[in-house]
Structure formats: structure tokens, C-alpha cells
Image (cartoon, rainbow, N blue to C red):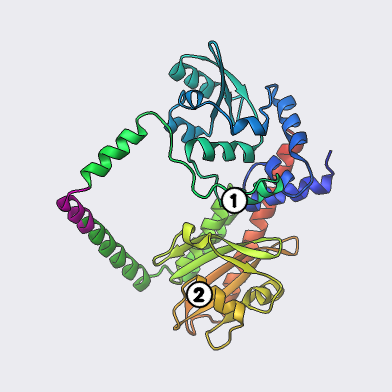
Amino acid sequence: MISEKQLDEALKAQVIYGGRLGTNLVELGFLDEEALAYFLSEKLDVPYAHPKKLLDIEKKVIDLIPYELVEKYKVLPFELKRKRLRVIMPDPQNLDLINELSFITGFIIEPMVTTEARLLEALEKHYGIPRGKRFQSAMEALGVNVQEGSAPSLPTAPNKQAQANTAAADEMSEEKIQEKLAKLKEKRRAMLIDEAQSAANPPPVAESLQVATQNLKQAPDRDAIANALIDFVISKFPRAAILVVKKDRAEGWKEAGTGFNDQFVQRIKIPLGVPGILKEAGEKGFALHDKSDEYPIDKMLRKLLRVEESLDIAVTGIYYRKAVVCYLVAVVPEGSIDEKTKEEFIRVAKMAGKAFDRLIKVKRKKERNP
């Protein structure tokens, strides 16, 4: 149903963006949802749950599996018939999990399957477990309006509401509030001390490059590649971010440094194809801009990353088969990038591209030789 070229494209997307292979095939438009569901049902020899029925499950069935297990294993109780409980599972062949669910619920478990995006959509509706930004495009590909539904409902697991009410009551007293504030201030003070010490005593450049190279060669997945890149930059400069290319824009993926985290950077979306540091880095492999040498799009990037006026932005393109798939962004002190540092950034970016290529080849081999 798909070509070799389409399989390669989907494997590349899976390594770079995450998600299951089927999800990426649907997102790319190479396979429709019904075909994917049919394939999963046939391959795993379990029934397929229709998407429309996933959003209309009885609450008494939803409450049969504790919220903690649902959140941990991403399973969804679907239908109860006498002593048999049908459960949608990401891996219907996980016998240990089937036995555990049977022991906890007291029912015979019958595994079912659906597409990854539909399962996450249902978990968000029934349990309030966020599907994550990664799967927005998957839901769009399936024709689901992801803007609807504003905030997800609270978890409906047994005793969850009672626990929440008890916790809220405990925190109402002024003494408790002041105690929490004191702990938070102390934690923040310790973080500032650690940050200052790290900035004052950065690891030797040669060592950080060597470690990054070794980590990239051994990276088992996409997150390990990103972490190796982030660690390399942070060993030298105060802040680092990775933007991943999705069609005509770059979106935030990971970030580390003073006062920032992944949740913050994942809100970033920068259009590509317009003059700016990202376009230049994609064409030349590396670009460095200070505040006096910025295009409008760079001002947007600087604002989104909250880059102080005294700092510059350095960007390196990461390539897979001559196409930019990610950008490594470093927030650097003015005048701190020399030719040697620039060469190191380009070198580590090339190693990251090779790491993506290696993971894609491994994925391809597994899919063709299951």
C-alpha cells in the first residue's frame, strides 16, 4: 500500500519527530486511518475499535482501571461484557500487562487496537491526560479539530477528587502557604548558585566536544541525540535550544539553560523561507547575528527565547540527506564565537545528522526484517 520511498520518508519522520510509524504514515498522507487500523488488527490478530466509539465510553467502564495505570501504560477500557473487559492497548501482545490488568480488575482482558493518535485523543477526553503537542498534526491529518475542547476534563480515577480536596484544604492556612514559599525561595536560591558556579567553571572545550561526539555515536533514540547537542552547547554557553523543521516552519523541541525548559521552547514557531538567521544557517551551515544585525524574523526569535541585549544568537543547521531537519541554537556572549568554536559547532551538527541517519537505517532494517 506504500512505496519504498514513502516508507523511508515515514521512518525519517519517526526518528526526527517521534511517534509510531503508522502515525507518521497517516500524517504524511501515505496511508489513511482505516487502512492503518485494518493492518494493525490483522498483524496483531485483535479486534479494531472504531474511532467514533472511543469518545462515547460509559463512565462505569472508564472507572474500572485506575488512573495511575492508564497514565503509565496508555491503556483504555472500552467495553464490558459479563466477565470480559475489552481494553485498547498500544501493545496488545504485552502478556504481563494483560495479566496485571486482569488481576486488578477481576475480569478476563480482551486486547483491542486502534491508531496511536485516536487512543491519545480518547485518553485526553476520558482521563484528562494531555495528548501532547507532537500529535496535533496527526489529529489534523485525521480531520479532527484539535482547537476544540479547550481544557481537558479532570481525571476520573477513583479517589482522585477526594485526594485533591484534602490537599487543597491542607494548603489553605497562611502558615502552610508561607512554609511553601520559603521552600521555593530556598530552592531557587540554590539553583542560582549552581548556575553561577557552572558558568564560572565550564568544562574544557576539547573535552565537551569529545563527549558530545561519543554520545552522538551511541545515541539510541532521537531524545538522546537532542540531549547530546544540548549538553555540548550548555558546557560552553548559558543557553541552548533545538528547533525541528516541520514543512514551512521551525518549531521548538528542546531547550536548556538559565530559567528555561522544554515546555517553554515548545511554544515557539518560526516561519522559514524568509531572510533571517535560520535561513542563513540552513544555506551556509552556520550563522551568527548580534542585535545590530537582525532581520524582523530574528527579532521574533530573540523575543521568544528572551535573549538579553548583551547576548548574540548562533545557529547551526543539522542535515539529513542535504535537507535541514533541525537547528541547533546557542545563546552566546558577544564576541565569544571564534573560528575554532564555529568549526566545532558545524562538526557536532554533522555528527548529529549521521546519528539520525544511523537510527533511520536501524528502523528501516527492523521494519523490513521483523
Region rendered in magenta:
172-182
Residue 331 colored magenta? no
Q: Quadrant of residue 80?
A: top right
Circle 2: residue type: Lys
Residue 38, percent from left and from top = 75, 30
Identify the residue at the far bottom of this view. Answer: 292
Q: Which of the two residues, 40 or 217, is positioned nearer the viewer here?
A: 40
Residue at 66%, 33% in the rendered image: 52
The residue labelled by disc 1 is: 134
Q: Secondary structure at mark 1?
A: helix
Q: Is residue 131 left or right of residue 358?
A: left
Residue 181 colored magenta? yes
Residue 100, percent from left and from top = 47, 21
Of the numbered discs in the image, which one, if any, rests on residue 16? none
Residue at 61%, 49% in the rendered image: 146
As displayed, is residue 149 above or below residue 81?
A: below
Q: Secondary structure at mark 2?
A: helix
Residue 64, percent from left and from top = 46, 23
Q: Which of the two residues, 15 or 259, is positioned nearer the viewer here?
A: 259
Identify the residue at the far top of this view. Answer: 82
As displayed, is residue 334 above or below residue 115?
A: below
Q: Is residue 87 left or right of residue 319?
A: left
